Image: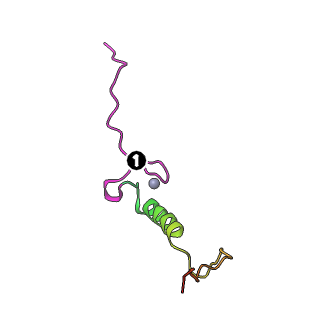
Amino acid sequence: MTQADETPPPADPACPICGKPAAPAYKPFCSKRCADVDLQRWLSGRYAIPGREEDSLSQDEEPRDG
Ligand SMILES: [Zn+2]
């Protein structure tokens, strides 16, 4: 007898960086390298990198009444 209808194993969350199966130690990433890559992306997107000014507009002054 051959059963072609096999139930697939529970889908583990794949590494969002490279798509490989995530490692328990570095979930949801597959390795520390990928975790680091994601961290760098997150940091670069969240915080401004010192020594690099893109915005020409200065928002130092806040409009205040007084
Ligand atoms: Zn990975």
Q: Quadrant of the N terminus?
A: top left
| Secondary element at tag 1 | loop
Name of the residue lying farthest toward the top: 1
**Residue at position x 38%, y 46% in the image:** 13
Picture coordinates of residue 54, whole percent (x, y): 66, 74
**Residue at position x 49%, y 54% in the image:** 17
Q: Is residue 45 magenta?
A: no
Q: Is mark 1 within 8 Å of ligand 1?
A: no
* Corner quadrant of residue 60: bottom right
* Corner quadrant of residue 24: bottom left
**Residue at position x 41%, y 63% in the image:** 32
Q: Main secondary structure of the magenta part?
A: loop
- Establish if 33 lies above or below 58: above
Near mark 1 (Cα within 10 A), the count class, few <14, some 14-19 or many ≥20, is some
Frontmost residue, 31 versus 40? 40
Name of the residue lying farthest toward the front: 66
Location of mark 1 (residue) = 21
Q: Is residue 8 magenta?
A: yes
Q: How is the image coloured?
A: rainbow
Frontmost residue, 47 versus 3? 47
Quadrant in which ligand 1 is drawn: bottom left
Q: Is residue 27 left or right of residue 18?
A: left
Name of the residue lying farthest toward the right: 56
Which span is picked out in magenta? Answer: 1-27
> Which amino acid is tagged 1?
Pro
Picture coordinates of residue 66, whole percent (x, y): 54, 87
Picture coordinates of residue 46, whole percent (x, y): 50, 68
